[in-house]
Structures are given as C-alpha cells and as structure tokens.
Image (cartoon, rainbow, N blue to C red):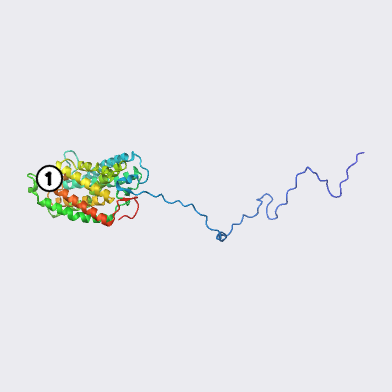
Amino acid sequence: MTDTPTPSPAGPAHDPFAPPPSPPPHPRQHPHSHPYPYPHPRPHPAAYAQFPPYPRPHHPPVALTPLPYHRLALLTGRHRWWRPLVGTGLVLAGGVAAMLLVLLGSQVAGALWGRPVDADGFRVWGGAGETGLALLSLALLLPVVLLAARWAQRRPAGTVSSVAGRLRWRWLGRCAAMALPVVAGAFAVMLLLPSPAGDGTDDMRWIGLPGFLAGLAMVCVLVPFQAAAEEYVFRGWLTQAVGAWLRSPWLAILPQAPLFAAAHGWGTPWGFADLVVFGLVAGVLTVRTGGLEAAIGLHVLNNLLAMGVSAAIVGALASEETAADMDWMSVCVDVVMLCGYAALVLRVAGRRGIEAVGTGAGAGR
C-alpha cells in the first residue's frame, strides 16, 4: 500500500527552480502598457533662465587683402590661369550674340513698320537709324562684361567698376563736370582749325528742328551706355584680365590701348595714334583712381558733344568717319586736352582721397 503525501497546511511546497513571480501591474495602467503611465514632464522655460546661453563658436570673417584695380581678378582667391581666357571668349561670344540679337530685332521691327529693303534683302532704317542700332549693339556689351566677371572669374561683377565694388556715382559726376569744359574747349578749337580740302565740310546743311531733336534724343539715350560699355571692355575687362597674370600696372594698361584703337578701324596714322593715346590716358586714370569713373566721364562727354553736333547736320550721323580719321592738327589739340584732363583729375583725386586700392566692398566715394 502506497503512502499518499498529505498536503501541508501552509500551502504547496516551494519549488527552488521555478521562475520568480511577475510584479503586480500598476493600478492605473494596463498590464501590457508602457511601464511609465504618464509622459515625462517638461520643465518650465523659466527653469533655464538661471543658466547662461551656450557659447556659440565665433568665426571671424576672412580678411581680404586690398588690391589695386588691375589686380582685382585675384580678389576672391579663385583665380586660375585659364579664367581670363575663358572670360574673354565669353565677352567675344556675347558681343556677337548682341549684334545678332539687335539685327534680328531690327529686321522684325522693320517688317512690321514696312521699312524699305536694300539690295541684300535687309530692312534699312536710314543713316541715323543705322547709327542707333550700332550704338545699341555696343551698349549691350556692358552686361556681357559683368556676367563674364561673375561666371568666368567667380568674383563680384562690381569689381569691374572700381575697387569699391561698385560705380562711385559722386566721383563719376565730378569727373564728368571736369571733362565738360575741357572737352568743349578742345572741340571749339578744332572747329576753328582750317579744314583739309575735300573733307565735305563745305556741304554742311542744317537738318531741321524735328530731325535734330530726334537725332539728339537718340544720342543722349544711347551714347552714355555705348561709351561706358567700351570702357568696361577695354579699360575694365582687358586691363584686369592681363593684370591677373602680371603685377605691373603698366603691362596691364598697354595691351588694351592699341586694341581700342583697332576697334575703331584704320583711318589715318594720326587718328590711330590719337586713339592709342586716349586708351593709355584712360588706362592710367583707371589704375590711379581705382575705377572706371574718370575714363567713363571723359568718353561720354567726348562722344556726346561730337555726336550731338553731328545730329544737327544733314547726313552727319550716317557718316562712317570716326576718331581714327582725324588729321594731325586735330590730334595735337586732342592730345593736349587729354593730358590736361588727366592732370586735373589726378590732382582732384589726390585732394579728395579717392582710393586706388580696395577689397571690392565698401562705401567708396
């Protein structure tokens, strides 16, 4: 007979190998919910008031080294030997594109206005109209140069204008005011000089008030942009492109002068020499004053007076003659005018403290 164990009055015997019992659930949560019944409370913002703000690392701005005007292509440190070449190609391509754009626009407008057609099948706008289209084509080089500086050389476009990173309008106004009496005096002396035989001055006739006003309006609107665009191309872009490779300002100024003269065509040796002198004087003023303002003021006033007078004469605006066709007497007067203007500008610039070096950013003058 087998003995049956009698249960203990204290309950079943404890098994030493059994897992420990699970703790009882929180009275306010489900047994299978998150162990914390409520989200962690966020402290009030006032609790952080007793602690100082976490110090942020301070990175001082990079100090740019002041550079002369002809070396501003090196300002950002992104210069590579090939960037001036690529930028010059962009300027040339942009100039061709501007000419084609103006030609296309003139043909479309001519077809709409019923303009006559020449032997080659192109719509013609007359002498003054064709001159206006040529001025517009040159004026469009101004944004082309600024874009080339921005895209090809990776620098602010305003560094083509001056060492202040922009065109210094007050200084430009002073330069124009200085150029007005000097250019007007030289132009008056040229009118008193004896005219070479066969130059056509004996046939000059008044064009009439309506024609004069129309031509003068065209000249006043387009010539400032045309003259400024030429300065941005030759004294601006080309000077800084060469200056990116060569430290000497004289070597940076020299190449643009004969190129400027060649762009006006070959007329007489005297006229070509006069244009070279103009390019050299304008280049020296640009480097010595740290910007294009002095050259622009002289160029704009010179072209405004010359073409403004031409607007009053029948067929004068349609003439293909340029400064390259000047005779030796006119060249002598013009060279004296250029030297006098340069001496006056340099004297005023020195007295007013016009900056010749800069970082391309600042108030300027």
Seen at 12% across and 52% down, the residue is 189
Q: Is residue 211 visible?
A: no
Residue 69 location in percent, x, y?
A: 30, 48
Quick check: 90 left or right of 12?
left
Residue count near mark 1 (Cα–Cα under 10 Å), binned few <14, some 14–19, many ≥20: some
Front-most of residues 306 and 219:
306
Residue hosting label 1: 328
Quick check: 110 left or right of 160?
left
Residue 84 location in percent, x, y?
A: 31, 41
Residue 161 location in percent, x, y?
A: 29, 49
Front-most of residues 42 and 151:
151
Residue 29 location in percent, x, y?
A: 68, 53
Quick check: 190 left or right of 178?
left
Front-most of residues 256 and 250:
250
- Residue found at the far right of this picture: 1
Seen at 32% across and 39% down, the residue is 86
Q: Tell me the amino acid under the disc marked 1.
A: Trp
Q: Is residue 269 visible?
A: yes
Locate residue 77: give its quadrant: top left
Q: How many marks?
A: 1
In the image, residue 215 sits, relative to residue 264, either above or below, namely: below
Q: Please state, as top left, top right, bottom left or bottom right, where the C terminus lies in the image.
A: bottom left
Quick check: 97 left or right of 79?
left
In the image, residue 363 sits, relative to residue 80, either above or below, namely: below
Q: At numbered mark 1, what does the secondary structure look like: helix, strand or loop? A: helix
Q: Please state, as top left, top right, bottom left or bottom right, where the N terminus lies in the image.
A: top right
